[in-house]
Each structure stands twice: as structure tokens, then as C-alpha cells.
Amino acid sequence: MSKETLAPPLPPTDARTEAVAERLFGLKWALRKDSTEIIHEEWNTASEWIRDGYLRQAIEVLAAAEQAEPASAKASGYQDRMRVEYRELTARAGRLRDMLQRYADGTLDFEPTCPISLLSRQLDVMDEYALILRRRANIEHISLGEQRIDTATRDTR
């Protein structure tokens, strides 16, 4: 092959990219149950074209991870982050509330490994946290949007 048909040169890589590349490389060796020292030695002695291939994969993985940030990280300001946090919290609390209701009705299609009393306590804490966010939003004049009836009607001390 001529130099013109080879892949473009790698951009400068940092220690994080090197570590990710070595871990990607190590995944195939890990199936053989090799020790981390052997995997590290194999990485250090691998030919340049093998290392370049894994470095390219690492660059792609890291770029994809940066693009897949959670919605809360993409929010522009604290008000947007608060809205996202409240929306995510009430959605999770709603799913937990629905699961607990199905358990009480006997229609839950699995047996929770965690005690129901602990799950109920978790729901209470989530509802309390939603109440705190609503109070704070009210003080700071932030609209949180639609509220579930069951989390909006708690004591507003």
C-alpha cells in the first residue's frame, strides 16, 4: 500500500485517550483471563498499526460519549437544569409509585428483591425533594411546568 491510501495521521492524543485505547485492546485479552500486567505488556509491545487502530476507536468512543451527555448537562442555566431535574425526579417517582401500586394490587409481574418498606421510604423522600424544588421554584419565580397531582398536593409548610 502507498502512503496516500493509508488512514490520515492520528490527532494528538492525551493520557485519557491512551488509557481508553488500552482498555479497548484489553477487552479481547480479558476473555482469556489474562492478568492486567500481561495485557499492559501486550499493549506496550503491540505494533504501531495495531495501537493506531485502537487509538482511533478510543477517539471515536470518547467523541460519542461527549455527544451523549444527559439532558441535565445540556441545560443552559440553573433554571433549565432545575426544570430538567424536577421533570426527571417526578417521572422516576411516578414510575416507582406505579410499581408500588401494582405490588399492592397484586398485579406486579415480579417480586422485588428490595423490601417494600424501603421502596416506600424512597418514594417519600423523592416526593419531599420534589416539594423542596417546587418551593424553591416558587421563591425564584421559575415555572416547573405541569405537576403530578400526587406530588403537588403535599403539605406546603
Image (tube, grey):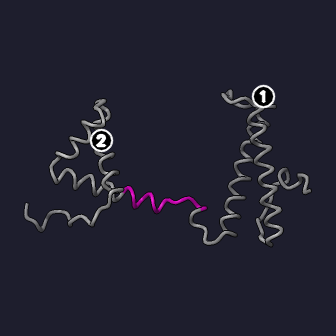
Image quarter where the N terminus lies is bottom left
Specify which label sits upstream in the sequence, 1 or 2.
Answer: 2
- Magenta stretch: residue 151 in it? no
Q: Residue at x 24, y 64 (%)?
A: 10
Q: Closer to the camera, 123 or 110?
A: 123
Q: Residue at x 32, y 61 (%)?
A: 14
Real-space CA distance between mark 1 and mark 2, rounded to the nearest whole angstrom: 47 Å
Q: Is residue 27 left or right of residue 4?
A: right
Q: Closer to the camera, 56 or 20?
A: 20
The type of residue carrying mark 2 is: Gly
Q: Residue at x 80, y 43 (%)?
A: 124
Residue 16: % across, % down: 36, 56
Q: Nearer the viewer, mark 1 or mark 2?
A: 2
Q: Which residues are magenta?
A: 61-72
Q: Is residue 99 above or below residue 150?
A: above
Q: Is residue 131 above or below residue 137?
A: above
Q: Is residue 41 above or below residue 151?
A: above
Assign a secondary structure to mark 2. Answer: helix
Q: Which residue is mark 2?
A: 26
Tally of marks: 2
**In the rendered image, which quarter is residue 95 located in?**
top right
Assign a secondary structure to mark 1. Answer: loop
- Magenta stretch: residue 63 in it? yes
Q: Is the stretch drawn in magenta largely helix, strand or loop? A: helix
Q: Which residue is mark 1?
A: 106
10 Å crowding of disc 2: few (<14), some (14-19), many (20+)? some
**In the rendered image, which quarter is residue 147 located in?**
bottom right
Q: Residue at x 22, y 52 (%)?
A: 51
Q: Residue furthest left?
A: 2
Question: Is there CB contact under 8 Å for labels 1 and 2?
Answer: no
Q: Is residue 96 left or right of residue 42?
A: right
